[in-house]
Amino acid sequence: MKHPGMVRVVIVAWMLVASGLLAGRPAHAELLLSQSFDSAALGEPMRFSIYLPPGYGAPDEAERRYPVVYLLHGVGDDERGWPNYGKVDETLDRLIVAGDLPPFIVVMPNGLKSWWVDSSDIGGPGNFGTAVRDDLPKHVETHWRAMTSRDGRFVAGLSMGGFGALRLAFANPERYRAVGAMSSALWNRVVPGWRPSDPARMTRIFSGSFGEPFDPERFIANHPRRYLPNVENPPAPIGIYLEAGDDDGFGAQFATLELFEELRDRHIPVELRIDDGGHQWNVWRKALGPMMQWFAGLMKPAGG
């Protein structure tokens, strides 16, 4: 008969192995909320949250570099939106531990209501487009083991973040391997000379990112569609992943379909997913895993 103390040691050891601790691999990711760095583009600190995948701290992977997804939030959220409501760590932990997804770093910046464009020249929220394109990757790639090549850099977002992700990727295809856009707030009804019926609502939504009052010409000049010629003949293949819920009350599914059709008409490769649901977190939480797996499928076998 085994001594009770020995049985306890065996059980504890088994639990440690199961959790990965004896192997030097944490079973769960590390999620660092509300970090900050000094952004030259903003002229002030930029906040962000960062997800480090299982195994990131393992001694045997000290030289490994990981692909990075810059994941952008929508209007009304901040750097804690995706962690708190999108459950990024839970989704990626599950997929990575199961072997269904290679480890990724995910960076989730706070973009206020900037629409992820530059607006300091008109008194808007600030130059968030440049901050996310230049300053944030430089900081992340310096302080964490993030891949520094285009093949390991992705951008994605929801609603306002979908608009921003598409704009960043289409304007700078040399910087990103792929873009993912969920329920993108594309506002296709905005045309030259368009005027809103409720200016106060526009102020709440856009916060001066395109001028105050809202300037449709500036919005159109910053729209992802303006940069489509860049992805007709990009310097290297760029993946485009579009997703929306079929019951989106803001009509994002229709705007997404319009963009999908325009990309196809231009012979630009694109993936489309229309899921069940509205403009809400339960749709985006479910869409996150398939999008990440699609990103992983684009990467070179050796990880770039």
Image (tube, rainbow, N blue to C red):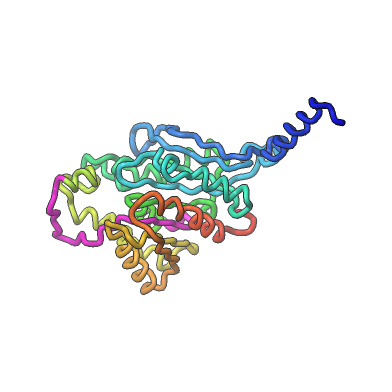
The residue shown at (39%, 56%) is 182
Q: Nearer the viewer, residue 131 or 214?
A: 214
Left or right, 109 with reference to 160: right
* Residue positioned most to the top: 5
Q: How many marks?
A: 0
Q: Nearer the viewer, residue 136 or 82?
A: 82
The residue shown at (49%, 64%) is 237
Magenta stretch containing residue 184, yes or no?
Answer: yes
Q: From this view, report whether residue 256 is shown above or below residue 9.
A: below
The residue shown at (33%, 37%) is 42
Left or right, 5 with reference to 246: right
Quadrant placement of the N terminus? top right
Quadrant housing residue 171 = bottom left
Can residue 135 be seen here? The reply is no
The residue shown at (33%, 54%) is 279
Q: Position of residue 172 (x, y in %)?
A: 41, 55
Q: Nearer the viewer, residue 200 or 14?
A: 14
Q: Position of residue 21 (x, y in %)?
A: 68, 35
Q: From this view, report whether residue 292 is shown above or below residue 266.
A: above
Magenta stretch containing residue 193, yes or no?
Answer: yes
Q: Position of residue 12 (x, y in %)?
A: 73, 32
Quadrant housing residue 85 = top left
Q: Which residues are magenta?
A: 173-200
